[in-house]
Image: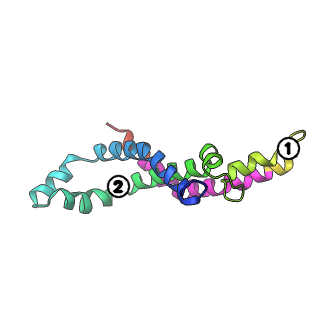
Amino acid sequence: GLYGTIPGLILVHSIYGIPIATLIFRNYFTALPHEIIEAGQIDGAGHWTIFRRLMLPLSLPGFVVCGIFQFTNQWNDFLFGITVLPDPTQQPITVALNNLSGNFSVQWNTVMAGALLAAVPTALVYLLLGRYFIRGLAAGSVK
């Protein structure tokens, strides 16, 4: 009952995004100093308390990087959007951009206006969260 519905597309994207999210968080958490975990253990905190009270508050840049990657991937989706959602009124914007070009001629002004409108949300996300994005990428890449 998920084929042809938005929840089905969300489920596909959630499953498809697990590997990159795992990689981002694994690299981010290994870059955090081990002394923080040791300090929590000395204070008597368990694994879940250390994770919830120490690691999660420090991992905001990792969440932002993962969120930006997932948003960009889902916003620019073409393959899953055209496969899972056959109804043109529910398909992503990239499928609509593809449908703007005709069979015999292309009205480039219409296509470029659509491309500009499609790029605005992604550009706003990068502009608003750019400092966290750079911080999260740098933290996950340092050994």
Indicate the amino acid at tag 1: Gly
The stretch drawn in magenta includes residue 126: yes
Left or right position of 41 against 54: left
Residue 67 pos. (x, y %): 48, 54
Residue 72 pos. (x, y %): 57, 50
User: Which quadrant does the C terminus fall into?
Assistant: top left
Q: Residue at x 14, y 61 (%)?
A: 45
Spatial CA span between label 1 and label 2: 46 Å
Q: Which range is magenta?
A: 113-136
Residue carrying label 2 = 59
Instruction: Pick out the residue farthest to the right.
Output: 105
Residue carrying label 1 = 102
Residue 103 pos. (x, y %): 86, 40
Of 128 and 18, the residue lying toward us: 18
Indicate the amino acid at tag 2: Ser
Residue 57 pos. (x, y %): 32, 61
Mark whose residue sits in front, 1 or 2: 1
Per the image, label 2 sits on a secondary structure element best described as loop
Of 28 and 48, the residue lying toward us: 48
